[in-house]
Amino acid sequence: MRRFALIVVAAAAAAIVITQAEAAEPPAFPRAGLVSQDAPLRGAPRDTASLQAQMGRGEALEIRAERGDHWQVWDYRRERGGWLRKSQVLLVPRGEGAAAELLSQLRLARQQFGTEGLGLGLAAAYVQAATPAELAGAGGAEALDAMGTFAERIADRASVPTARPTEGQLAAQMDVAARYGLKFEQFEAEDGRVQVCYDGEVFRRLLATPAVPEQRVRAALALTRPDCLNPRATVREAEARDQWRQQVLAQVDAATLAPHWKNRLSMRRASVAASLAFAQARRGDAVQPQALAEFAAIVPTELTEDDQAAYADAAMRVNAARWLGSSAAARDFGAVQLSLQPGADGERCVELKEAGKPAARRCSFGQVALASASLNREGRALALAVQPLDGWRELWVFQKGRDGWRIDVMPPAPAQPGLGVAEFAGWVPGGAQMLLAREFRAEGRYRRSFEVVALANLATERQSPEPALLGAFQRWSDPAWRGGSPMRR
C-alpha cells in the first residue's frame, strides 16, 4: 500500500512530502497545497499580471511564500512558479490529525459533483499522510473507494455524446486524473459515440483490502461494467475476460449486502453467466445453469429507478441463453421431424423432414435449440429459437405453403445486433396467427413489445407493451413461455 501511495503522489508533485514526523510547530513554508478551483497562475500577486499557466482543480503545489491575498507557489510538473489567490488554494493539513482531517474533506468532496479533481488530490494526500495501519484499515479502503468513484465520474462525463474531452473543465479533470496515475481507455460504442472508461486499478487494490461490503460490491460492479468491454475483443479474449469478471463478482458476499446492492450484484452475475454459457455452448461444452439461478435471485420490488435499464439488459441476456443447456439433436412431431446436421466450416444445419423426406434446410453459425421447437396444431407452422450472438436470439419460423416449406428469420429488431430476443409465445387456433414477444436494446433504442403476428406475411396485426393488454395473450399464450420466459417479469 505504501508503494501505491508513492506512485500516486509522485505523479502530482514529486517534491511534496507530508509525514507524521513533523515538529509540533513546523515552519510556515514550504507547505503543500491543492488548487481548489480552476484558476490562472500569475507572474505576480495581482490579477493583471501575466498568465503563467492555467491550473486545474486538484493539482498539487508547493507554497513557498505569501503576499497579501496571494500565495507564491511552485508547480513541479510544469517546473514553473507563480502566484495564486489564497481563495483558490486549499492548504493540505499536516501534523497530528492530518489524515483524519483529509478524510473528512474527502468525504465532503465526494458528495459534490464537479469536484472530482480536488477529490483525487485529497485522496492522494491522505494516502501519503496516513500511517501504514491507517492505510491498511477502513480509512485506506475509503480513500481508494473515493478515488475510483471520482475516476468513474470523470469517465462517465467524458462519454456523454456532447462531451469534449480535450476542451474546458473536462479536459482539466482528465489531465489532473492522469497526473495522479489514473488511466482511461476509449471504445467506440454501438451508437457511434466514444465510451471512455477508467481502467479500474484502484478498485482492484480495494478488493485486496478489508473493505466493507458496499465498497466491495461497488468495486466489483465497476470492474465488470458491460459498457466498458472492448467490442473488438476476439472470441477467446472475450471468454477469458468474462471468466475474470465472474471471479471478481464471486469475491463479494451477497448475504451481507443491502437488498438494492444484492439486486445489482445478481443482475451482473446473471449477465456474465449468460455470456459464459454462450461461449460454453459454442465450444460444445456442458452449459452451467447459473444465469437463470442468479436472475431468479433478483427481488423486483427492491429495484431502484436507476436499476431498471440494467434489469432489462440482464433479462435479455439471460433470456437469450435460456435454451443453451438443452442437448436435443432431433425432434419428432409425428408428421414432421427436425434434426441437426453438421454444415460447412463449423455451421449447424437444421433439416426438416416431412413423411421421412427432406423438406427444408437452413444453416447457421449460431446455437440452434431444437428443444425450443413448437409445432402448431394444424401442423403447418413451426417456431425455433436460434442464438447467433451473445445476447441476441432470433426466431426461425417454418411454414408450409403451396410450394412446400419455407423458413423465415424474425430478429428482435431491424437493427444492428445489440441485446435482444425475439421469442415464440404461443399459437392462435386456426393456423393463421402466432404470438410473438420481442425485447431489444440496439442502436441507442430500447423497446419491449408483445405482438399478434399474421403467419401469411409475418406482419404485426396487434401489439402492446404488456401482454395483459392483449386478449390473445391471455387466452392462447404457451404455458412454457408463461412459466419460463424472463420477458414475463
Image (spheres, helix red, strand yellow):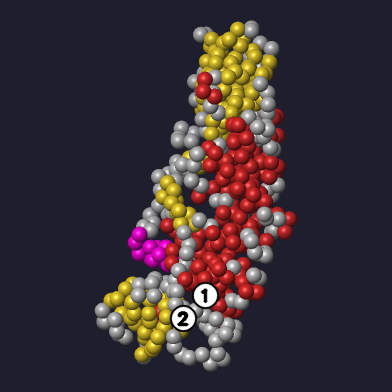
Q: Where is residue 42 in the image (x, y as percent from the top left)?
A: 31, 80
Residue corresponding to mark 2: 32
Q: Quadrant of residue 367?
A: top right
Label 1: state its secondary structure: helix
Label 1 crowd bin: few (<14), some (14–19), many (20+), radius 10 Å: many
User: Which residue is at a point 49% across and 79% down the rendered structure image?
Assistant: 17
Q: Work out whether residue 166 can be spotted.
A: yes
User: Which residue is at a point 59% across and 68% down the rendered structure image?
Assistant: 1
Label 2: state its secondary structure: strand
Residue corresponding to mark 1: 125
Label 2 crowd bin: few (<14), some (14–19), many (20+), radius 10 Å: many
The three-letter amino acid code for the residue at tag 2 is Ala
Q: Are marks 2 and 1 in contact (CB under 8 Å)?
A: yes
Q: Work out whether residue 117 can be spotted.
A: no
Question: Any magenta on residue 374?
Answer: no
User: Which residue is at a point 59% across and 40% down the rendered structure image?
Assistant: 275
The three-letter amino acid code for the residue at tag 1 is Ala
